Amino acid sequence: MAEGPAPEGRPEVKSRTKKKNHLAIYVVSAVIGAGLLGLSMQHPNSANAQQIAIAPPTGAPMSFADLIERVSPAVVSISVKASAPNSAGSPFEQGGEEGGEGEFDFRKFFGDPGGRQQKAPDVRSMGSGFLINESGNIVTNFHVIDGAKEITATFKDGRELEATIVGSDKATDLAVLKLKTPGPYKYVSFDTAEDIRVGDWVVAVGNPFGLGGTATAGIVSADGRKIGGPYTDFLQIDAPINRGNSGGPTFDLKGRVIGVNSAIFSPTGGNVGIGFAIPSTTAARVVAQLMKDGRVARGWLGVSVQDVNKDIASGLGLKDAKGAIVSSVVENGPAAKGGFRSGDVVLSINGKAVNDAGDLTRQVGELGAGKTVPVDLLRDGKRQTMKVTVGDRPSEDKLASLNYRRSNSAPTTPEAAASASALGMAFSALRPEDRERLGLSANEPGALVTDVDPDSEAAQRGVRPGVAVVEAGGAPVRSAADINRAVADAKRDGRETVLLLVQVRDGARIWLPVPVKGG
């Protein structure tokens, strides 16, 4: 939900409704009106017909005015002067260490890396926020204040007060601010009862399109939505929210904050009835840590993982598509010290089952640094238990610079030139410059992909020349013959896919399941 300045002027509204639509509306209005007024709508020949009674359901408010009047003084518009956004985009467009994305989009690793970028001028953006105590702490979204040089909070009564950043957390898209002017201020509280249900009424208050002080109502449409980061299962609401609502509160009918508006689904950039809010239970926990330490401390293993989907499960010969498969391990990280290897499938940690990569990331994040826990994993088809001491998760910038590769892989022997594999790819030996570009050391296995059949399954899944296949079917790859051998083994064992471990750039490896024709 990128925020932008308020549009100038008033948009021209044109009605294109046809007469037949007007007629339909009138008919519905007449029917509803008749029911509300208690009028009988029986057909003359239907002597036994019964009147249809229409009444508001129990608990449905006739007006939200009292609620909105009470909470509005605690809701503010956030105006930010910030550095131009970097190329990283929003937190919900990112992959990440220990954060699998289900069906992995291989194509995001390809494309024109672009040239040198010139420094862009500062930008101004707008969002929303709300006060959570009388001393002037405000909750908003990370992406609202990212790169902020100046922050101004505007109240319902017109006051404009400067604010500073207390702490922020990109992973959950939350931030806490502090007003420079002493309080006391009116404030609202998080709902920590966890009693919100799908279908409950909610009211969103915020600053859509810079208009300020706007309230909309709807219901909770769904919960547990996974739309990006591994640390938040979002509430889906149909109360209209738009650009500028980011960071604003969603209330229940008791005036408690049940969510922090953070994202919308929209093909046009405007509201289409699908908005997402960070649940109050998650927000309250993160906000407490930000106010205490200015950051959120999370456990960390130092692995890159993916979901074990059906294709990967088939490639491993597994019946159930559950768990998280390790694609690479940080050298000297907690997992490396614990003996983890690429290809391990994590089934449980600290006694709790791991359903997918995001589940693993979330569970590890909740563990304290320094805690030693058991990990059940599958290696080479055999289940085993290992011990690992959880580390302290580094900052996002630090994570991006870590070296994700194994130093104890089998050595590579010089191989001959390219030859075609059974999967429609051609290979050659890796040259020193290829290894440097991909981040592969001299003793690591790998074969350079030099050509891809455009009609092959590999091409359909996004493989392009210039990457290196380092493993196939769990064995090191040094030439196309190793690929062919892995394909033959998969066919012999009745598996429909073969798993390739692909090095796409320095520090980035992914497991790519490729269907085997005739498998």
Image (tube, helix red, strand yellow):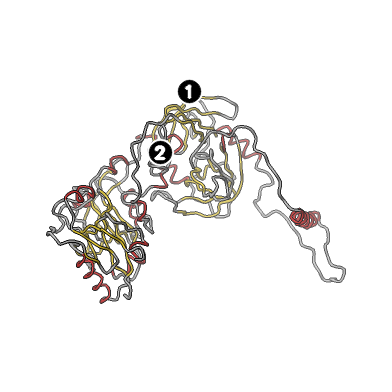
For the point 44% across and 31% down, the residue is 177
Q: Earlier in the sequence, mark 2 or mark 1?
A: 1
Disc number at residue 370? Answer: none
The residue carrying mark 1 is: 182
Specify few, some or many for label 2: CA neighbours under 10 Å numbering under 14, 14-19, or 20 or more. some
Image coordinates for residue 373, horizontal then vertical, percent: 25, 54
Badge 2 vs badge 1, beta-carbon distance below 8 Å? no
Q: Residue furthest right?
A: 44
Answer with left or right where residue 71 lies relative to residue 398.
right
The three-letter amino acid code for the residue at tag 1 is Pro
Question: To which quarter of the image does residue 36 belong?
Answer: bottom right
Residue 133 drawn above or below residue 109: above
Specify few, some or many for label 1: CA neighbours under 10 Å numbering under 14, 14-19, or 20 or more. few
Answer with left or right where residue 510 lies relative to residue 144.
left
Q: Residue furthest top?
A: 181
Q: CA distance from mark 2 to mark 1?
A: 20 Å
Residue 217 drawn above or below residue 326: above
Disc number at residue 288? Answer: 2
Compare residues 11 and 157 and report the one nearer the observer.
Answer: 11
Secondary structure under tag 2 reads helix
Image coordinates for residue 189, horizontal then vertical, percent: 51, 39
Image coordinates for residue 32, horizontal then vertical, percent: 76, 56
Secondary structure under tag 1 reads loop
The three-letter amino acid code for the residue at tag 2 is Ala
For the point 72% across and 51% down, the residue is 17
Compare residues 191 and 334 and report the one nearer the observer.
Answer: 334
